[in-house]
């Protein structure tokens, strides 16, 4: 399957410290799972680091959106991590191909994404939250 757009929205954070970019990492792959980035095949033992550029900032809701439009093709499950400062893990997850289903137009490819936040409630990777922002956090 192919992913043409990957985005992350970081909320309830002071935007003054929001970086211009985050890093999307693909480390582990199962043997036999092919990976291609922007048309280039990546060897199984090689990690991939893609840039998620800051796309939108909403100061009113204290949200920043980061996006990558790199084309990522894979033939199976692909684990990923999103990091700040190349060391601070924000979230991790996996993209996975599901069994093919069908709709009225024929065969349809399905996939799923599981994510896990590495930042606890009220936490912010970009700097200290004000008391008001901490009280507002989900």
Image: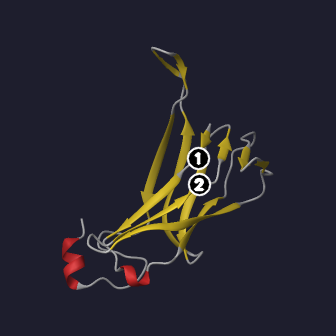
Out of 55 and 100, give the one closest to the viewer: 55
Q: Is residue 13 left or right of residue 48?
A: left
Image quarter for residue 59?
Answer: bottom left
- Dot 1 falls on a residue whose secondary structure is loop
What is the x, y in percent for residue 76?
A: 64, 38
- Dot 2 falls on a residue whose secondary structure is loop
Q: Residue at x 18, y 75 (%)?
A: 135
Image quadrant holding the C terminus, namely bottom left
Whether label 1 touches label 2, CB < 8 Å: yes
What is the x, y in percent for residue 41?
A: 79, 48
What is the x, y in percent for residue 5?
A: 54, 50
Q: Dot 2 corresponds to which residue?
A: 69
Q: Dot 1 corresponds to which residue?
A: 4
- In this figure, what is the number of numbered marks? 2
Out of 108 and 85, give the one closest to the viewer: 108
Marks 1/2: CA distance? 6 Å
- Sequence-wise first label, 1 or 2: 1
Q: Residue at x 69, y 45 (%)?
A: 30
Q: Residue at x 54, y 48 (%)?
A: 94
Image quarter for residue 126?
Answer: bottom left
């Amino acid at each position: 399957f192919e992913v043409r757009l990957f985005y992350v929205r970081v909320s309830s954070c002071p935007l003054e410290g929001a970086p211009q970019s985050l890093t999307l990492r693909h480390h582990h792959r199962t043997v036999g799972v092919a990976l291609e980035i922007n048309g280039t095949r990546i060897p199984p033992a090689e990690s991939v680091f893609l840039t998620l550029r800051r796309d939108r900032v909403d100061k009113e809701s204290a949200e920043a959106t980061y996006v990558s439009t790199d084309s990522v093709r894979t033939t199976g499950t692909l684990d990923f991590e999103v990091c700040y400062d190349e060391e601070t893990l924000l979230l991790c997850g996996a993209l996975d191909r599901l069994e093919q289903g069908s709709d009225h137009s024929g065969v349809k490819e399905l996939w799923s994404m599981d994510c896990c936040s590495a930042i606890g409630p009220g936490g912010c990777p970009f700097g200290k939250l004000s008391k008001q922002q901490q009280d507002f956090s989900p």
